[in-house]
Amino acid sequence: MAFVLHISFDNTRRLKRQVYYFRYRNHLFKLIQHSPRKHADVLLTIIPTAKGMEEQFSYSVASEFLSALSWENNSQIAMRHSGGYGARDGLSLRSARCSIYSLPRLPSYYSIMKGYTIDRIPKVETAEQRTALTLFRDGYSSNHTYISFLLFWQVLDTAGRKATEIATQIYGAHKQHLHIKSSIEQLNLGGRDLGDYLWEDCRNAIAHIKRAKTRTSIKPDNADDNRRILISTHIICEIARYFISHDLNLSESLYLVRCKGIPYPLYTDEAFIHTHSCKMAYR
């Protein structure tokens, strides 16, 4: 018996269509967009059986796609596994229906930006890009600043180098592209490099509630601490964004096209489009 897997997600950038069909990494998906005030959106895919490698692979591919979509549309996307139902073998994706409705996790007033598409997403080519995009997506969609900071910081850890050095180097060499000058001016770095400040007074202070008196600590109910971490989170977010684009070289794109002889739209790069008879899928 086949299994219709449901992957729910909130998306603050509303799409033009209610339903999309597409193939990503040789995996077929049906995207259904619901009213953000009632239910989360959902990705459906049909796998041979529930539980096992097929389910994990499908979830991983869906996660990569939603991370790429979040990056392309600059949207907050919060995803989760929602289960599924058994179905007869041979069921087509067009006939599959959503049967599990998840409540939204992001406030509905975030979902006021409309008219977006899934026509183009970044081309994920390495494990580091994939992990960094996932962390960035989760940090960007988190409802809590402290969690967002930790996830953005982890993005820098994907390079295999010290995150403190990466943050300091990016700010020192590319500050004109980061748009964080006014935020930096509101902080007291104490003569330290930016990376050392973010590591000691933010990352470690968030992770460890009890610290030596000589080290910076955070009180969750202190307004000044909350304001400082909010500013610092904006800074590390912009540094992480630059790091993904340039250090991890996330520069290529995939396009959703229809090709002659292929039943569903698929994501492919420009080289494939130039050598095949293709047109944009949903225009």
Image: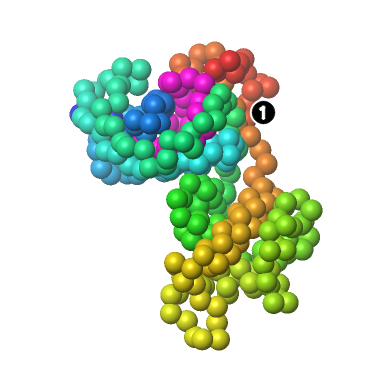
Q: Amino acid at mark 1?
A: Ala
Residue 233 shows in this picture: yes
Task: Determine whether, in the image, residue 174 is placed left or right of residue 11.
Answer: right
Q: Position of residue 248 (x, y in %)?
A: 64, 52
Left or right of 194? Residue 68 is: left
Instruction: Say which quarter of the image contains residue 35.
Output: top left
Farthest residue to the front: give it. 223
Q: Say if 21 sits above or below 269 in the image.
A: above
Region rendered in magenta = 7-28
The residue drawn where x is 76% and y is 50% is: 177
Q: How is the image coloured?
A: rainbow
In the rendering, at what x and y percent does residue 6 appear? 32, 34
**Element under disc 1:** helix
> Could you tell me which residue is drawn at 56 percent across and 62 percent down?
227
Secondary structure that dominates the magenta span: strand
Q: Please tell me which residue is depicted at 46% across the width and 71% down the height of the picture.
A: 219
Res 268 seen here: no
x%, y% of residue 242? 67, 51
Residue 144 % position (x, y) = 46, 55
Q: Residue at x 47, y 59 (%)?
A: 147
State the quadrant of the N terminus: top left
Q: Give yes or no for residue 161 being in the magenta stretch.
A: no
210 above or below 83? below
Tally the marks. 1
Task: State which quarter of the image contains the C terminus.
Answer: top right
For residue 115, above or below residue 229: above
Which residue bears the numbered disc 1? 271
Task: Name the one closer to the observer, 244 or 252.
Answer: 244
Instruction: Determine crowd level at label 1: few under 14, some 14-19, many 20+ residues with C-alpha closer than 10 A.
Output: few
Tell me if residue 24 is in the magenta stretch: yes
